[in-house]
Structures are given as C-alpha cells and as structure tokens.
Image: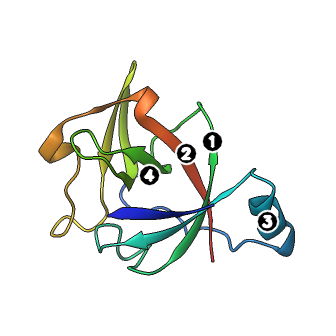
Amino acid sequence: MEFKKQPFDNITPPLPSPTRGGTLLSYIGYLQRNTVHGQSMEPLLHNGDIVFSKKTTTFNVGDIVIAKHPFQNKEIIKQIAKITGEKIELRGLNNDESEDSRVYGSVAKKDVLRIVVAKK
C-alpha cells in the first residue's frame, strides 16, 4: 500500500478520528495528511482513506507506520510485526494483497518515517 503525500498481534484497534484541533495541527506541520492507495492494510485501512501521521523515533510492535520502500522511490504504510535492534519487520494486514517484509526483508529503523495516529 503506498501513499501520495498531501502537505498486536495481527489486528490493531481502530485508529481515532482527528478532532478539529488535529486538523489544525496538520496545517502547522505537526501532523502529515496522507491518502491510502491499495488494499494491503484492509480491513483497517481502505483505498482512498485519509490518515494523519507524525514524526517519531519511538516505535512499538503493532504500530501502524509510514516507511520508505526499500527498493522503490515511494512511501508505504504497514504494521510493525517485529523490532530487532535497528531493524524493523513490516507487515500488511491483508496477506493476499501485501508486499511487505516477507518479500523484501526487514527495513532499517531510520527508514520508518512516521507513525499513523488518526484516520479521517
């Protein structure tokens, strides 16, 4: 699943909806708004959904994150399945539609850019 920028075990609880304050924060640079493209994160996120993310360097297993794709010039959204030192294993929730760490291996922690904090 990839994004187009605009400015657990297996299932994560639903993401909160942004408040008006959350929308305001996206305009001042605290949150970034992204549109979901693809089906790899269904049933939690669907093609066309809007999510908000923030920069962080602290991640936990189960977090939904936006990362650099290891071989293509694009960003992807996945769930953290495992953290080993500076490597993070990413998985989609829809195994039939997801290209993730099962295909390209773990990604460097520095390539995990933001954590998804809300869904519109």
Local crowd size for mark 4, using a 10 Å CA cut-off: few (<14), some (14–19), many (≥20): few
- Image disc number at residue 114: 2
Nearer to us: label 4 or label 1: 1
Q: Position of residue 37 (x, y in %)?
A: 36, 72
* Residue that mark 4 sits on: 8
Name the amino acid, label 2.
Answer: Arg
CA distance separating discs 4 and 1:
21 Å
CA distance separating discs 3 and 2:
16 Å
Residue depicted at 44% across the width and 65% down the height: 4
Nearer to us: label 3 or label 4: 3
Mark closest to the chain's N terminus, 4 or 1: 4
Q: Is residue 96 above or below residue 102?
A: below
Q: Quadrant of residue 88?
A: top left
Local crowd size for mark 1, using a 10 Å CA cut-off: few (<14), some (14–19), many (≥20): some
Tag 4 secondary structure:
loop
Name the amino acid, label 1.
Answer: Lys
Q: Are marks 3 and 2 in contact (CB under 8 Å)?
A: no
Residue depicted at 16% across the width and 45% down the height: 102
Q: Position of residue 47 (x, y in %)?
A: 38, 79
Mark closest to the chain's N terminus, 3 or 4: 4
Query: Which quadrant is the N terminus positioned in?
Result: bottom left
Mark closest to the chain's N terminus, 3 or 1: 3
Tag 1 secondary structure:
strand
Tag 2 secondary structure:
strand
- Image disc number at residue 22: 3
Q: Position of residue 104 (x, y in %)?
A: 16, 41
CA distance separating discs 3 and 1:
15 Å
Q: Is residue 38 left or right of residue 5?
A: left
Q: Quadrant of residue 15?
A: bottom right
CA distance separating discs 4 and 2:
18 Å
